[in-house]
Amino acid sequence: MELICPAGTPSALRDAVAAGADTIYCGFNDETNARNFPGLNFNREEMRTSVAHAHKHGVKVLIAINTFARAGGLDVWKRAVDDAVEAEADALIVADVGILDYAARRHPQQRLHVSVQAAAANPDAIRFYVEAFGARRVVLPRVLSIAEIAAITQNVTCETEVFIFGGLCVMEEGRCSLSSYVTGKSPNMDGVCSPASHVQYRKQDGLLISRLGEFTINKFAGEEAAAYPTLCKGRYQTDQGAGYLFEDPGSLDATTMLPGLRKAGVAALKIEGRQRGRAYIEQVVRTFRQVLNALDRNLPVPTDGLNALSEGQSTTVGAYRKSWR
Amino acid sequence: MQLTLGPVLFNWNPDQWRDFYFRIAEEAPVDTVVVGEIVCSKRSPFIADQIPTVIERLVACGKRVLLGSLTLMSLPRERRQMAELAETKDFMMEVNDLSCLGMIGGRPFAVGPFVNIYNEAAAAYFASRGAERICLPPELPLPSIREIAAALPEVAFEVFSFGRVPLAISARCYHARLNKLSKDNCRFVCDKDPDGLAVLTLDNEPFLAMNGVQTLSYACTSLLGEIEDLAAAGVRALRLSPQHCDMVAIAKAFRSVIDGKDSAAEAARALSQIYPIPITNGFLYGKPGSTFTVNAGARK
């Protein structure tokens, strides 16, 4: 299985190449990609030299153009497609039907992957992307069990790719407006979720209060580690009491699911985290390289290296285990 | 400007569901009604027997009927259900997921608000595949709506204009989780909350509404004050999403503003009596969806 690693900067890309990634994914420094954070991502020149560097080391580069294009502003997204092709990206990761249509017509030879933001969660949806735009791979939303992933993979003519580590969307990707409801900034339109620019921490009555926009997302007592106020991982209350109604703070770690994913026929495994620092990327990539090498030789899978890197020290295998639902 | 009644998003008692539509058919000044369970396939069997009767009544009263598809389909059973729905020749399907496109087989269809159409290129693609009506995503700001509608004058564009805003869909059922039940054995606990279960912040501020696998806003969107702007932008229909309140009265309030009989402010006062929930319209202004902006340009 191909190991796909994130890179938010050219230096992170070089680290990931050195640490054993098969493939790197990254994006341009504008609203066309779903990790549009300040100080992150690649300008055109950096993209060209980074792709060349990766190719020199036998590593592929996928360029994510995976936000939904702004009406009246399509040229920004079309230019990103043209420039990614010119930079010799091995594939483009696209979510917007309008942009997929453009890329397929304008660059018929270019390999296209369907972004997780396109929410293609069953064989019929995937078939649509294959037939309409010649998509060669689909990144599956984090709402499916291993058995469902196996059934999908057997029933479609393109490859499937899944997330195995990092941030975990609890809602189906590409169909969540929680962030724009609270901050005006959405994953689909702006490439951000629960952006740091709208986060506030406040101390009150011995509690640390985390807020996003105008809403309190969580309160922590003195000894409790304060998680980042991602909306779907906040603590809220109903008439039945308070708690993590949607999901606990924490992140995805599907290391234990890797044998099942391999058996399911998944072509590629993706690590989330283009916003992460170099040290983190280097360590995660190196660890997963070891895990996959062990798996290939039918050796026991080492799992200890990743625990310290997970948010809030707590991890889940998410929807891969059916009981998560 | 036309009015569309969106599908009931909540798990209503089947008899209540049927009676709701009977009354809509006879009394509500809406042009189009979307029928069907679009949130959770486990609820579908409860209303299955009622659907033909409801459709018959709606048609007899001159309403255009659309058949709403599920939003998230992962089970083979769900895909079979949708394939059957797509074969219904007499009524257009309102597609809430792209997987339905291959099932429709070239017939005209409508697109629901859960398909990501954010620009004129995506809208044009769906129009080329046979989309005649498109309800745009609720988070779209007015300038985007204007661009899209201007590019495709042949398509009837619709905007989510009343109701708690659907904000997310998940594989996980939050109602089941809250009640410490598995999704497969959920005992249909969401039926206790026919208007969604209020989710408050730890400061007791109303925030969201839980509806099984769906999450909505606690506050209610109302674009009563923006009807003229929407019409000027080329929007042809306003979508009213059923809440557990007098939806006939809600439809009449919107109709009275469209027809120029009431001012937006008068209708808004009536609406606040019919459905006393905080009102928002932020998405249309490109602001947080949870905010409300007074439309200074609205006719008083």
Image (spheres, helix red, strand yellow):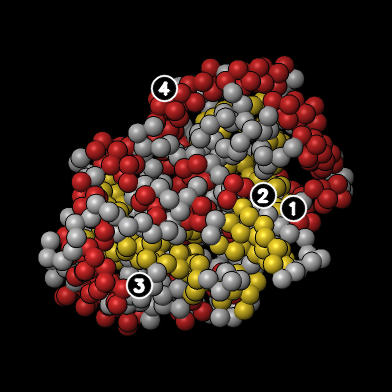
Whether residue B194 is situated above or below residue B31 in the rendered picture:
below
Q: Which element is circle 3 on?
A: loop
How far is disc 2 from disc 1 in space, using C-alphas?
A: 8 Å
Circle nearer the N terminus (2, 1): 2
Q: Nearer the viewer, residue B232 or B174?
A: B232
Which residue carries the number 4 mark?
A106
Q: Which residue is mark 3?
A: B243
Do tags 2 and 3 sit on the same chain? no
Nearest to the observer: residue A184 or residue B215: A184
- Count of picture labels: 4
Mark whose residue sits in front, 2 or 1 = 1
Task: Give residue A39's position: percent from left, percent from top.
Answer: 64, 33
Q: Is residue A243 above or below residue A19?
A: below
* C-alpha span from label 4 to label 3: 45 Å
A149 on left or right of A225: left
Q: Quadrant of residue B180?
A: bottom right
Crowd rating for badge 3 (residues with CA inside 10 Å; few <14, some 14–19, many 20+): some
